[in-house]
Image (cartoon, grey):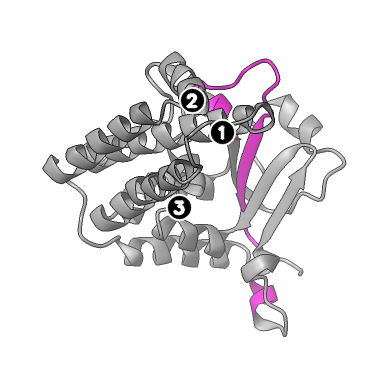
Amino acid sequence: MKMTCRTTADSAMMEGMADPANVLLYGIVGSTAYGLAGPGSDIDRLGVYASPTIAFHGLAPPTGRQATIVTTEPDVTFHEAAKYATLCLSMNPTVTELLWLPDELYETRTPLGGQLIGIREAFLSARRVKDAYLGYAVSQFRRMESRGDGSFNAGTRQKTAKHARHLARLVHQGLLLYRSGTLDVRLPDPQWYLDFGERVAGGDLTRARRVLSEAEEGFAAARTPLPEKPDRARVEEWLHDVRAAHLHDIA
């Protein structure tokens, strides 16, 4: 299937890296997408690709670790279609956001990639959204609290500030998704999250506890349009279309 590129920067960026064939969907994610990127921030990209269907009938099918390609210069991750779908069904926030990007952040979107975006609601379920967004943030904030008096030395402060603002982002995005059924990747007030991270890294764990408490109360009180379970049948139908489209590719 021919790759549909949105920008010439895409091909330049991928030059020299072990990018897979049959890329279905590819875009800019992470801090740039959230509005939190600074002058020194890396640009993270995430993509979905399809392995040749015949490859799944051999002795070493492209599953598990073999179904993910990661590079650090540049920062790019590709997941094979089946693995990507599985991660989304578990509501992994890092992979889920690819389906909810503003149009201008997609650098490759084939017809099958567009179909994947079109069924993004099929991956959603109330319990998994709550567990993936709120549950993870709570566990990570608890780890911060365990650091004695809550202070951080100069060597860890920057890392802690980044971690704290992304945890605050998760509870904000998760609660919005839980309440509305829509994931808004771009934050409405990025500076608030930047300031929050600095305050937490400076030892203000009271602020962090307040954000967590408000999020827990918000989830508890919210009425959600999300279903109890994801629509696995729609996801599998898409995956069957992917396999049919690449049935005659050579492994």
Q: CA distance from mark 1 to mark 2?
A: 7 Å
Disc number at residue 61? Answer: none
Q: CA distance from mark 3 to mark 2?
A: 22 Å
Question: Which mark lies nearer to you, 1 or 3?
Answer: 1
Q: Amino acid at mark 1?
A: Thr
Mark 1 lies on a secondary structure that is: helix
**Which residue reaches farthest bottom?**
59
Mark 3 lies on a secondary structure that is: loop
| Quadrant of the rendered image containing residue 223 | top left
Question: Which mark lies nearer to you, 3 or 2?
Answer: 2
Point out the tag, 1 or 3, that comes first from the N-terminus.
Answer: 3
Q: Which residue in the protein does label 1 denote?
A: 160
| Quadrant of the rendered image containing residue 155 | top right
**Can residue 63 be seen in the rendering of this structure?**
yes
Q: Which residue appears at 59% of the width and 36% of the height?
A: 27
Q: Which residue in the protein does label 3 denote?
A: 92
Q: Which residue appears at 64% of the width and 33% of the height?
A: 156
Residue 143 at what x, y percent from top left?
A: 47, 47
Disc number at residue 197? Answer: 2
CB-based contact (under 8 Å), mark 1 and mark 3: no
**Can residue 223 be seen in the rendering of this structure?**
no
Label 1: few (<14), some (14–19) or many (≥20) C-alpha neighbours in 10 Å: some
Mark 2 lies on a secondary structure that is: helix
Q: Which residues are magenta?
A: 28-56
CB-based contact (under 8 Å), mark 1 and mark 2: yes
Point out the tag, 1 or 2, that comes first from the N-terminus.
Answer: 1
| Residue 36 falls within the magenta-colored stretch | yes
| Residue 181 falls within the magenta-colored stretch | no
Q: Which residue appears at 67% of the width and 43% of the height?
A: 3
Asked if residue 209 lies left or right of residue 32, the reply is left
